[in-house]
Image (spheres, grey):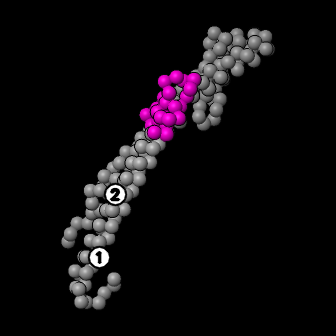
Amino acid sequence: MAEFSLGPGFEAFQRDMERQMGDFSQMQDAINAAVGRGEAADGRIVAEYRTEGGLTKLDLDPRAMRLPAAELSDAVRTAVNAAAQDLQKKVQEASASMFKLSDDPAKGMDPAGALASLDKIANGFAGQMRDLARELGVQQQRAKEAMDNYNGPNRPGPR
């Protein structure tokens, strides 16, 4: 019995898709694991910020509680904002492998670079889909020929 295969085109498509999905999965895992950390009041106030849950930790050293209310409020805000900025930096670093980011953190993502990355992914996917459609057409023709050979050219059978 002959071995059935969708051919090297489909297998290459499948390998590329698995690699790309693995890259996205690794990026997502890195982003989900990222923890932004910020401090204020000489390290007496520590905040942690995550993509899921936002502010997940706020530690206040008892000595920080001696600060005047307005100063304590400012210090807490400073620590939380620093933690959020640290998380944003870590997310940008994790996604830099998939999308072109600007070297200037104040600019964030470079839109032209991001569009170029998305274009590259989309064009690669479109090319792979064309290859897959071509390969499926070849396989469909092979299946038809196999059925014709099995039924014989003059024997009735499903067509």
Q: Is residue 71 above or below residue 133?
A: above
Residue 107 seen anywhere in this rendered image of the structure: yes
Report if the CB atoms under discs 1 and 2 are less than 8 Å apart: no
Residue 131: image tag: 2
Quadrant assignment, res 68: top right
The residue shown at (29%, 72%) is: 141
- Magenta span: helix, strand or loop, mainly? loop
Horizontal and vertical percent position of residue 134 = 33, 62
Between 147 and 114, the one lying in front of the other is 114
Q: Is residue 136 magenta?
A: no
Local crowd size for mark 1, using a 10 Å CA cut-off: few (<14), some (14–19), many (≥20): few
**Would you say 146 lies left or right of 69 here?**
left
Residue 73 is marked as none
Rendering quarter of residue 52: top right
Q: How far across and down, in percent of the image, does residue 108 sit?
A: 55, 28
The answer to which of 18 and 129 lies nearer the viewer is 129
- The residue stretch that appears in magenta: 93-116
Could you tell me residue 122's position as x and y percent?
A: 44, 48
**From where the camera sits, is residue 30 visible?**
no
Q: Label 1: which residue?
A: 144
Q: Residue at x 45, y 44 (%)?
A: 119
Side of 131 relative to 54 (left or right): left
Find residue 48 and report its image quarter: top right
Residue lying at 33% horizontally and 84% vertically, measured from the top left: 158
Q: Nearer the viewer, mark 1 or mark 2?
A: 2
Residue type at numbered disc 1: Lys
Q: Could you tell me residue 151's position as x and y percent?
A: 25, 84
Is 19 above or below relative to 134? above
